[in-house]
Amino acid sequence: MSPTVNATAQPLDVAAIRRDFPLLSRILHGKPVVYLDSAVSGQMPLRTIERMAKYERDEHTNVHRGVSTLSQEATDAYEAAREKVRKFIGAASIKEIVWTRGTTESINLVAQTFGRMKVGAGDEILLSAMEHHADIVPWQMLAEEKGATLKVIPLTDDGELILDSLDELITDRTRIVGVVHVSNVLGTINPVKEIIARAHAKGVPVLVDGAQAVPHLKVDVKDLDADFYVFSGHKLSGPTGIGVLYGKLAHLDAMPPWHGGGNMIRSVSWEKTTYIAAPGKFEAGTPPIAAAIGLGESIDYLEALGLDRIAAHEHELLAYATEKLSAIPGLRILGQAKDKASVLSFVVDGIHAHDMGSLLDGEGVVVRAGHHCAQPIMTRFGVPATTRASFAYFNTREDVDVLVSAVLKAIEIFK
Ligand code: PMP
């Protein structure tokens, strides 16, 4: 059992949960849909969809605009969602919760503000070998602009970070470490608390990409002591277009704004503009209000299910799927870390991942096939692409059985 899973957690009532997701009753190509793609985007429960519709139908107006009752109601609902996020990740204050469009925008914000402040010519940015492009490209752009270099924490063949060399990799030129909490390709749960402690021992701040972690693990940013922690609403059973940047208040206060415009200023004159405090100074313009409120509703839903019960259920499915898929000749699973979340990537001899993905789609099985926006991992494992199944709290053993038969059918076709 994974060290991050509570084996005594009460089982989930999956049959009841499935009724909260209308999409799960769809028929695809004449087959009942089997949704194994929550790592790409989690499904939203009905109550989130309805809460967003209620805002659009009965409450729609802008936030932080004037004294109208409607605007105050919208502002209250929008700020209540921020408080739900704060509590969900254990942040000390809502001032530390910045709304963004998603993980990608959160990392770009940090790179373009904190990064530009801290990184100069000859400095180093340390990333792990299992980062998503969202936690590579913004740093590479910054490094090119500043004349800095990227360094990489290597991986074992099982898909675990090699931390023996961490103390040498963090040098007196390292300005920031970026590490993914859970790999979207390998499923590895990284020991981010340890990595943060070791970086902090050398005075180096750490950004954690939590996009694939928050749907599966109870995250406590204070306990982790993360400087920045970022994630997307749509992976957390919420809508697209909304994401979160958590930053320690001292960092956010010291950072310049990124986007300029309305909603983030204290005063504007032709001579000079002054800004409001965090988080507002990073939130120029009209935000995605319905999406923020929807994300708050999804967090309520997940908390009612219980993150420990979700983790236990998904872990059981992962173990079952790993056992079944491993038994298929010619199939190789990428990522065999001891501590894994419910993401399962595989390749099959003689079948391109895209062909496998299309054949599974024909059976109603929705998976992701491709490089998963993590080309350096593909290069590390010498494959162009993988097929990835990812399991959520609404999936069942029967879903895994359908996946396994569909994979066997594909292998038959390619024989
Ligand atoms: N990081 C990881 C680990 C991810 O899995 C993803 C989404 N695949 C992202 C970052 C980017 O998230 P978004 O596209 O929502 O910004």
Image: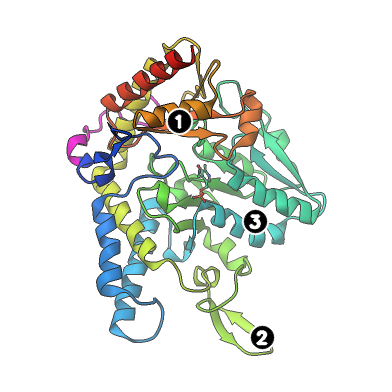
Circles 2, 1 touching at the beta carbon (< 8 Å): no
Q: Position of residue 74 (x, y in %)?
A: 32, 74
Determine if residue 3 is in view.
no
Q: Where is residue 30 in the image (x, y as percent from the top left)?
A: 28, 33
Q: Position of residue 56 (x, y in %)?
A: 30, 69
9 in the magenta segment = yes
Query: Which numbered circle lies on residue 272?
Result: 2
Which residue is denoted by mark 3 in the rendering? Answer: 111
Which residue is denoted by mark 1 in the rendering? Answer: 358
Three-letter code for the amino acid on which mark 3 is drawn: Ala
Q: Which of marks 2 and 1 is in front?
A: 1
Front one among 277 and 182: 182
Label 3: which secondary element = helix
Front one among 379 and 199: 379
Considering only vertical position in the picture, is 349 above or below 134?
Answer: above
Question: What whole-number distance in Å separates the C-alpha atoms at marks 3 and 2?
Answer: 25 Å
Label 2: which secondary element = loop
Question: What whole-number distance in Å separates the C-alpha atoms at marks 1 and 3?
Answer: 37 Å
Determine if residue 161 is in view.
yes
- The stretch in magenta equals 1-16
Q: Earlier in the sequence, mark 3 or mark 2?
A: 3
Three-letter code for the amino acid on which mark 2 is drawn: Lys
Label 1: which secondary element = helix
Disc 2 residue crowd, few under 14, some 14–19, many 20+, Cα 10 Å: few
Horizontal side of 64 relative to 117 (left or right) equals left
Query: Which numbered circle lies on residue 39?
Result: none
Quadrant assignment, res 154: top right
Residue drawn at 40 percent across, 32 percent down? 361
Question: What whole-number distance in Å separates the C-alpha atoms at marks 2 and 1?
Answer: 56 Å
Image quadrant containing the N terminus: top left
